[in-house]
Image (cartoon, rainbow, N blue to C red):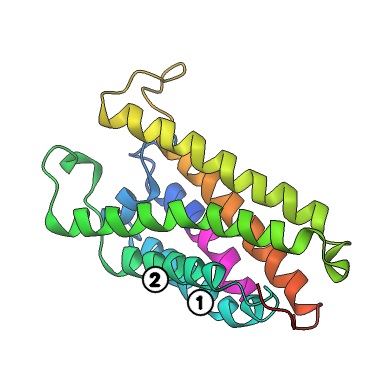
Amino acid sequence: MLTGLLAAPAAIAALDLANPQWSWVEVPASNFVGGRSGWLLSLAAIGAGLASAAMIGPIGARSGGRRAVRWLLGVWATGMIIAGMVPADPPERWDDRSAADTVHGIAALTAFLVLPIAATLLTRAWWRDPPWRRWRALLAVTAAATVAGYAAFLVALVDVMGGPELGIGPYATLVGLLERTMLWSYVGWLACAAVAASRIAPATRAG
């Protein structure tokens, strides 16, 4: 599971290096799929989705019967798999989006939305349970990072959709950088949750 999660940001970083013609600060990772080694993007998204799907059982067994958490993690995993299977358009086609790009965008944005919700709900559920006390600070910090990461990405995305204005220096927008930062925060929480869950006995109470 951890290998699949950590391979995702590593694959995106490799894809960024392979395509210096596009700015990873300004361009979302999804749009690099049309460049050199674009298959790495598909591998990253599908790998993260499959790794997350494999976590649903172990984490769900320790969530005290909270079905909402399992459903949210399932939506996240499914969205990432679909986003990996259906490619986005290259940057040059942003003004004339294809049907595939639309499907990719809906799947990815849905996944991006639900993961911070799942992280927050599950971290709150674990906060007062004695077996989780040694993990709660780390889980809380990484869960907060997912919320902050998503909020920053959303601001940048709305900025791009309405016309780039919130850039810094030579960069017209920071949507690419903030998307990658958000994804790192997601991987961070998922990795912490997976490691913690592997060391805690399954929960027995429902809720």
Residue 105's place in the image compared with 24, above or below, is below
Looking at the image, residue 202 sits to the left or right of residue 177; the answer is right
* Quarter of the figure with the C terminus: bottom right
Residue 179: x percent and y percent?
A: 46, 43
Q: Is residue 26 visible?
A: no
Q: Mark 2 falls on what kind of element?
A: helix
Magenta span covers which residues?
Answer: 1-11
Looking at the image, residue 47 sits to the left or right of residue 56; the answer is left
Which label number is shown at residue 53? Answer: 1
Nearer to us in this view, 38 or 127: 127
Q: Which residue is mark 2?
A: 78
Badge 2: few (under 14), some or many (20 or more) residues near its Cα, within 10 Å? many
Residue 32's place in the image compared with 207, above or below, is above
Q: Mark 1 falls on what kind of element?
A: helix
Residue displayed at 20% across by 53% down = 102
Residue displayed at 55% across by 41% down = 149
Which label number is shown at residue 203? Answer: none
- As for residue 6 lying within the magenta part, the answer is yes
Residue 99: x percent and y percent?
A: 13, 57
Q: Label 1 amino acid? A: Ala
Tag 2 or tag 1, which sits nearer the N-term?
1
